[in-house]
Image (cartoon, helix red, strand yellow):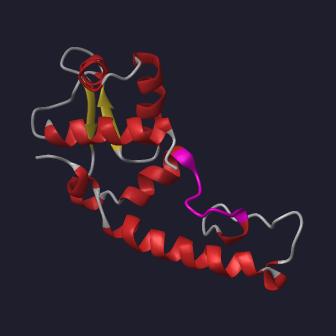
Amino acid sequence: MLSKKAQYAFHALTYLVEKEGEGPVQISNIAQEKGISLKFLEIILLELKRGGILGSKKGKGGGYYLIKSPKEVPLSKVIRLIDGPIALLPCVSLNFYEPCEHCTEDGCGLNGVMAEVRDATLLILERKTLADIAKG
């Protein structure tokens, strides 16, 4: 399941997509409009900024803004930045690989099935973008 943090990230990002072209959006406006705790939203937006999705401007007229077109931001990138691996097992993760403690990958039937699940999920999440989930 998507964490609450990832859900809030998507709510904030879709709000920024809707406000695209209007200049930077103040974090307090996003928090109020989307019903997200200001402190929690600050953490989320900083992670998205570090991940290369958002930019920010300080001072009067400042706030957050998308640095790429919504069509260029795959949902998979946001999920990985906020929640980490998309794969359900660490041994099938493409970006966060870790061997499992109690089995070998070649002798585990679950490994093969979870790799298929990962591939099917990624096929969708890499093809769909912020533009696909925004209302505008």
Query: Dividing the picture into quarters, in which one does residue 118 lie?
Result: bottom right
Check if residue 16 falls in the magenta segment.
Answer: no
How many marks can you see?
Answer: 0
Q: Residue at x 55, y 73 (%)?
A: 117
Q: Residue at x 48, y 36 (%)?
A: 4
Residue 132: x and y in percent read 22, 58
Judged from this view, the residue extending furthest toward the bottom is 106
From what the image shows, is residue 47 above or below residue 67?
A: above
Near-viewer residue (63 or 115): 115
Residue 64: x and y in percent read 29, 31
Q: Residue at x 87, y 72 (%)?
A: 103
From what the image shows, is residue 97 above or below residue 79?
A: below
Near-viewer residue (134 or 49): 134
Residue 44: x and y in percent read 45, 33
Query: Dividing the picture into quarters, in which one does residue 89 lie?
Result: bottom right
Give, as a single range, the part of the protein colored magenta. 83-90
Check if residue 87 falls in the magenta segment.
Answer: yes
From what the image shows, is residue 103 above or below residue 61?
A: below
Residue 125: x and y in percent read 39, 64
* In this picture, residue 44 sits left or right of residue 131: right
* In this picture, residue 83 sits left or right of residue 9: right
Q: Residue at x 80, y 67 (%)?
A: 99
| Main SS of residues in magenta | loop
* In this picture, residue 112 sits left or right of residue 125: right
Near-viewer residue (69 or 2): 2
